[in-house]
Image (spheres, grey):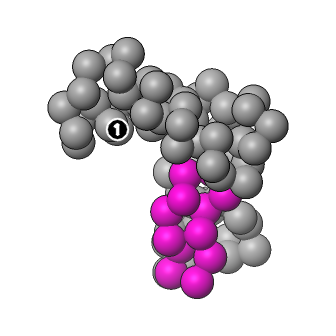
Amino acid sequence: MKICVACGMPMKEPADFAMGDTGKDYCVHCARPDGTMQSYEEKLGSLTAFIIRTQGLDKMAANVAARKMMARLPAWKSGD
């Protein structure tokens, strides 16, 4: 099982991978429609929205939480 380098999601099935390509290191949720990986800002925006929706945090708190989470992931180790 692979873990998405951009969001940390476990990828078990081909449908979990970007474009269904099990050779990719990022998941379907971190891919753009053309199969390329989202930028740091794109992922930050979608992860912030996800945290707001699922945890009920306000936008500022969700953004801080998203940045902290992303800082631990391989795709964003450089911080951007």
Residue at 62%, 76% (x, y): give it: 2
Q: Is residue 7 magenta?
A: yes
Furthest-top residue in this view? 60
Which residue type does callout 1 highlight? Phe
Q: Relative to 33, say whether 3 is above or below.
A: below
Please give left or right for residue 54 compared with residue 77 in the image. left
Q: Nearer the viewer, residue 21 or 65?
A: 65
**Circle 1 sits on which residue?**
50
Q: Main secondary structure of the magenta part?
A: loop
Q: Is residue 46 visible?
A: no
Residue at 33% across, 18% down = 59
Which corner quadrant of the image does residue 42 belong to?
Answer: top right
Residue 37 belongs to magenta span: no
- Quarter of the figure with the N terminus: bottom right
Q: Quadrant of the C terminus?
A: top right
- The span shown in magenta is 1-12
Foreground of the two, 65 or 22: 65
Relative placement, left or right, of 23 versus 18 is right
Q: Nearer the viewer, residue 27 or 78?
A: 78
Q: Please state the horizontal and vertical placement of residue 25, each as a whole percent of the image.
A: 71, 64
Number of marks present in the image shown: 1
